[in-house]
Amino acid sequence: MNRRPSLPGAAELFRLTSAPAISEEIAPAEVSTSDVTPLQRRGSGRTKHTTKITVYVSDEELLALEHARLALRADHGLGVDRGRVVREAIAIVLDDLETHGDASLLVRRLREQ
């Protein structure tokens, strides 16, 4: 009886985790932010993310985010994590900024500070 645990090999530990290739039909140079309508932008959902940022929030903001996540689960049957809520919120704010510009909620709130 072998008592050694079965561990992943180097190939599994150091595999490439690159993003899928872009279709040849749409080259990156052909897509601009002005081509994205508010209904097209969505949070990235449950996918493998290759880029990470760190955002510091207050205890109250984190608690509010967790309450929102729990409300989405309890009241709406949506089992989402905090990251997904944040990505959707970012998509909404960016759409509002693109659509309303100077009158967007983001611009107005940042000017209040």
Image: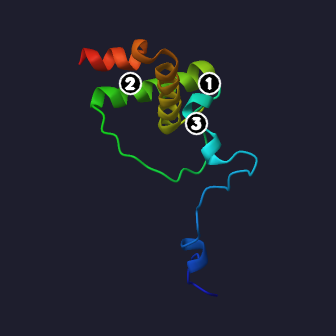
From this view, report whether residue 20 is shown above or below residue 64. Answer: below
Task: Look at 53% across and 36% down and name the residue there.
Answer: 84
Residue marked by disc 2: 64
Pick whichever of labels 3 and 1 is earlier in the sequence.
3
Task: Look at 30% across and 34% down and name the residue there.
Answer: 57
Q: Is residue 65 visible?
A: yes
Q: Is residue 41 visible?
A: no
Q: CA distance from mark 3 to mark 2?
A: 34 Å
Of circles 3 and 1, the one toward us is 3
Residue lying furthest bottom: 1
From this view, report whether residue 18 is shown above or below residue 47. Answer: below
Of circles 2 and 1, the one toward us is 1
Residue marked by disc 1: 37
Q: Position of residue 75 (x, y in %)?
A: 58, 18
Task: Look at 34% across and 40% down and name the residue there.
Answer: 55
Tags 2 and 1 in contact by the CB under 8 Å rule?
no
- How many neighbours does mark 1 have within 10 angstroms: few (below 14), some (14-19), or many (20 or more)? few
Name the disc covering residue 50, or none: none
Q: Secondary structure at mark 2?
A: helix
Residue type at tag 2: Ala
Is residue 27 shown left or right of residue 70? right
Colour mapping used in the image: rainbow
Name the disc covering residue 32, or none: 3
Residue lying furthest top: 103
Q: Secondary structure at mark 1?
A: loop
Residue lying furthest left: 113
